[in-house]
Every structure is written in structure tokens, then in C-alpha cells.
Image: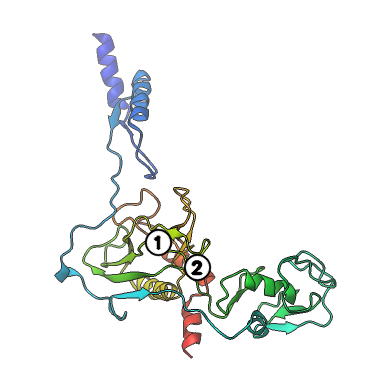
């Protein structure tokens, strides 16, 4: 009897310890929760089991009449088609716009071929039509390379008229990607995202069908898969959220949102994958890290877009 009273007094003094996922990153394994409960009970600690957070990928049902266009953004969808081949300019003509020849190069390494700039290029692939000892400086960032190496690098890329400095990643020209044909839809829905209670939500729907790879893809002529489409993504309908949407539209038009490659989650090759611009695909939770609340997301995605050459300043310069 005295032992029961003592146990009851201890339980009143010791607070209940819930067994749950404190970080909210993934559900607690039931077996692990059970073992934890047994050990805590044996130690004299009361146990309260709680349900793990629930994954919420989609908003509540929305009727067509509730879906609205986004103020300041024209239309509610756009498509991309197959890449049109550009004619005319050779790699040497493209690079000429971005380079200044250096007659007396410094005695340091070319960071493409790792040979000294004072010596001929060490590139051993197909022969460009420029002399291997010519050296050039990129006009904006000032980094210096063998022109021979830059031509070879351009030939191994997308050949879209743009060039990216391999040292500082400064982009010259307009960078485009190899995203396969598809459709991007965007509109407002009357629900709020976690962390953004005072605004509605911008919903983006990407649709890309499977198809055959083109000459710009890893395996031309081979089929590619498109898993998980349509893909639904979400932004807060705030000033910064609309800014992100407008830049995502530019990225879509430049075919930079998706690419064909190997999935980092499944290991499948020749499939449509995200291309270095992160999206939020969870509407009402953040169990996978792809949801809200996330105070840094909008700033992070703006930085990712800038790394692809897409910012308010760059798009304004193109219009001028």
C-alpha cells in the first residue's frame, strides 16, 4: 500500500513525457516508440504516446469558380516546345562577344586544362579552329583562359549562344536549358500556407509527358520517362511570392526548370528531373523539407534563379 502511494506521488511530481517526432522530419517508427515507452516506464517515467505529424501534399478541394488569375501576371498557363536549332554563329563568333585577347598572359594555370597560360592549351579532344596558344579574358569577370579551352567547353555544352565562367559562374548571354516540351499552369486558390496566414496561395502545376530525347539530351533517340506528373507546387501570394513566380516563368520559357537525367531519389536514368531550382510540393506540412513553414525558402529560390542568370535586373536588361 505504501509503495502504491509513493508511486502515485512520484507520478504527480514527474511531468508526462510524450514520445513523438520532435523535429517533424519523419514519422516515428511504431516499434521504436513502443521500445521507448517500455524503457521509460521501467525508469518510472509516465509515457504519453502521440500521433506523428500527417503529410499534407494538397489543399482542400477547390471549385473552378474559386480559382482566380494572379494580379500582375498575364495568362494562367504557358507551354514550351522543342528547341529550335540556332543557325549561323560559330563558337568562335559567340565567344568573340565576351572575350578580350590577352597578348601577354600571366604565368598561372588555365583552370580548364590546368596548363600554364604561357604555354599552349592542354586540351586533347576534337580540335577547335583557333590556335592553342591564344589567351582571352572574359569581359565582365576578368578571368583568363586559353581561347582554345573556352571553345572546347562551349562545344561540349548546350550551344545556346551563352557562356558561363567556370571559375565564378558569371553568365554571358542568355542561358537556356534542355527541358522537354510541357505545360506550366498557375493560379490563385483561396487557402493559406503554413507560415503565411494573411495571404492566399499561388498554385503551380507542371505537366510534362514522356517522349523521345532530342539531340540536346543525354541519349538522343532514346525514350525518356516522366514520373510524378502533373506536379503541384506552392508559393505564398505575397509580393515576394509573386516576384518568384514571374522569375519562374522566365526559367520555364528558357527551359531551365526540368532536365532529363538520372533521378537522385530512385536512381532511374533517362527520366525528367528537377534542375537546380527547388520547389515546394507539400501544401500543409513540411515533413519532407519540401513544404511550409520555411522562412528562408523565397530568398533561397531567388538565389538559385540568379545562379541560372535569372533576376529582375537581368530580365529588365533584356527588354531594354
Q: Please tell me which residue lies in front, 93 or 65.
A: 93
Q: Name the residue under label 2.
A: 303
Residue 137 at x, y = what percent? Answer: 73, 79
Quadrant containing the N terminus in the rendered view: top left
| Residue 18 coordinates in the image, percent (x, y) | 32, 33
Q: Do the residues labelled 1 and 2 touch (CB within 8 Å)?
A: no
In terms of depth relative to the viewer, which is nearer, 14 or 20?
20
Position in image of residue 104 (x %, y %): 84, 80
In this view, which residue lies farthest toward the bottom?
320
Residue at the image point whose x is 28% and y is 20% from the top: 9
Where is 64 relative to 92, above or below? above
Q: Which of marks 1 and 2 is nearer the N terminus?
A: 1
Q: Tag 2: Cα neighbours inside 10 Å, few (<14), some, or many (≥20)?
A: some
Q: Which one is nearer the viewer's eye here, 31 or 237?
A: 31
Q: Is mark 2 on a helix, strand or loop?
A: helix
- Residue 196 picture quarter: bottom left
Residue at the spot x=37%, y=29% of the render?
Answer: 32
Q: Nearer the viewer, mark 1 or mark 2?
A: 1
Residue 218: numbered disc:
none
Would residue 43 be found to the left or right of residue 305 on screen? Answer: left
Can residue 86 be seen here? The reply is yes
Determine the secondary structure under disc 1: loop
Find disc 1 in the rendering and name its residue. 279
Can you give x and y, in whole percent of width and height, for residue 151 in the image? Answer: 68, 75
Amino acid at each position: 500500500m505504501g509503495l502504491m502511494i509513493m508511486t502515485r506521488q512520484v507520478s504527480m511530481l514527474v511531468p508526462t513525457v510524450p514520445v513523438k517526432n520532435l523535429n517533424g522530419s519523419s514519422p516515428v517508427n511504431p516499434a521504436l516508440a513502443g521500445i521507448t515507452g517500455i524503457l521509460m516506464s521501467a525508469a518510472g517515467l509516465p509515457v504519453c504516446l502521440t500521433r506523428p505529424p500527417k503529410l499534407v501534399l494538397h489543399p482542400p478541394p477547390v471549385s473552378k469558380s474559386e480559382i482566380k488569375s494572379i494580379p500582375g501576371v498575364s495568362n494562367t498557363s504557358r507551354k514550351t516546345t522543342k528547341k529550335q536549332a540556332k543557325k549561323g554563329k560559330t563558337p568562335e563568333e559567340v565567344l568573340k562577344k565576351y572575350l578580350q585577347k590577352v597578348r601577354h598572359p600571366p604565368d598561372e594555370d588555365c583552370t580548364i586544362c590546368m596548363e600554364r597560360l604561357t604555354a599552349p592549351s592542354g586540351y586533347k579532344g576534337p580540335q577547335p579552329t583557333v590556335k592553342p596558344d591564344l589567351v582571352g579574358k572574359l569581359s565582365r569577370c576578368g578571368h583568363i583562359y586559353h581561347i582554345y579551352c573556352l571553345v572546347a567547353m562551349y562545344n561540349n555544352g548546350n550551344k545556346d549562344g551563352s557562356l558561363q565562367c567556370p571559375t565564378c559562374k558569371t553568365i554571358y548571354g542568355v542561358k537556356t536549358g534542355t527541358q522537354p516540351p510541357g505545360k506550366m499552369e498557375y493560379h490563385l486558390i483561396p487557402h493559406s500556407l503554413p507560415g503565411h496566414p494573411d495571404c492566399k496561395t499561388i498554385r503551380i502545376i507542371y505537366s510534362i509527358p514522356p517522349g523521345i530525347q532530342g539531340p540536346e539530351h543525354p541519349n538522343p533517340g532514346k525514350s525518356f520517362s516522366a514520373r510524378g506528373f502533373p506536379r503541384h507546387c506552392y508559393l505564398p501570394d505575397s509580393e515576394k511570392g509573386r516576384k518568384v513566380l514571374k522569375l519562374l516563368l522566365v526559367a520555364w520559357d528558357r527551359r531551365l526548370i526540368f532536365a532529363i537525367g538520372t533521378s537522385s531519389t530512385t536512381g532511374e536514368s533517362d527520366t525528367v528531373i528537377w534542375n537546380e531550382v527547388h520547389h515546394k510540393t507539400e501544401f500543409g506540412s513540411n515533413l519532407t523539407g519540401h513544404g511550409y513553414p520555411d522562412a528562408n525558402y523565397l530568398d533561397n529560390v531567388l538565389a538559385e534563379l540568379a545562379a541560372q542568370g535569372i533576376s529582375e535586373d537581368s530580365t529588365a536588361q533584356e527588354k531594354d
